[in-house]
Amino acid sequence: MSPARVLDRSRAALVVVDVQEAFRKVVIDFDRVAAAAGTLAQGARILEVPVVLTEQYPRGLGKTVPELAEHLDGVHPVEKTVFSAAAAEGFALDGRDQVLVCGIESHVCVSQTAHDLLDRGIEVHVARDAVSSRTAENRDAGLHKMEGSGAVLTSVETALFELLGEAGSEEFKQVQGLVK
């Protein structure tokens, strides 16, 4: 499937991968990534885009960080021990065929999730400013591998405005308030 390259809110879902407390002190730019994921979560709520949240072994790695969780009220995390969120029991896109992915770590869980979804024919967009790893090299390796496999690299702001589609609405004002 060749990517449409533009996100469509009637087709898209947001997948937030493993933004958990144990990663806070070891992942580079963690606070920026958590904030960016929070912006995406808020935008998804405004635009009525479904959200899938995952947590890797939360008993050992902790829950989703509070500064992100506060924007995910009503979203129940899919707990997993597999690296690919798409392979986790309970992971469902409910018929959506585009996914916007963010989270941790770029070269492990985010990458394996993206690749599993690509293999299923899902169009994958990765918000490059909302993913990270413990090292810049691993973050970049994950991004390059995903892009080389067919994922579209994007940014939080680009993704939100693609999902929005046009100006002049109350939704536009709300989304603009998130990124300006």
Image (cartoon, rainbow, N blue to C red):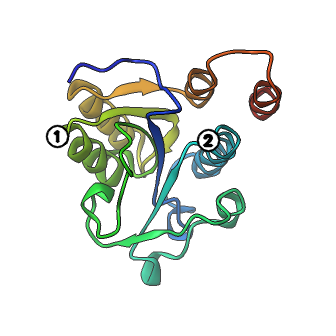
In this view, the residue in front, 58 or 100, is 100
Name the spot of residue 167 as percent of width and height, x first. 74, 15
Name the spot of residue 92 as percent of width and height, x first. 36, 57
In this view, the residue in front, 61 or 97, is 97
The disc placed on residue 119 is: 1
Which is nearer the N-term, disc 2 or disc 1?
2
| Residue at position x 51%, y 70% in the image | 22
Query: Where 150 falls versus 138 (above or below)?
Result: above
- Type of residue at label 2? Leu
The CA distance from mark 2 to mark 1 is 24 Å
Q: Quadrant of the N terminus?
A: top left
Query: Where 129 falls versus 86 (above or below)?
Result: above
Which residue is labeled 2 in the image?
Answer: 40
Name the spot of residue 104 as percent of width and height, x first. 44, 53
| Picture quadrant where residue 147 is located | top left
| Residue at position x 65%, y 37% in the image | 47
| Picture quadrant where residue 60 is located | bottom left
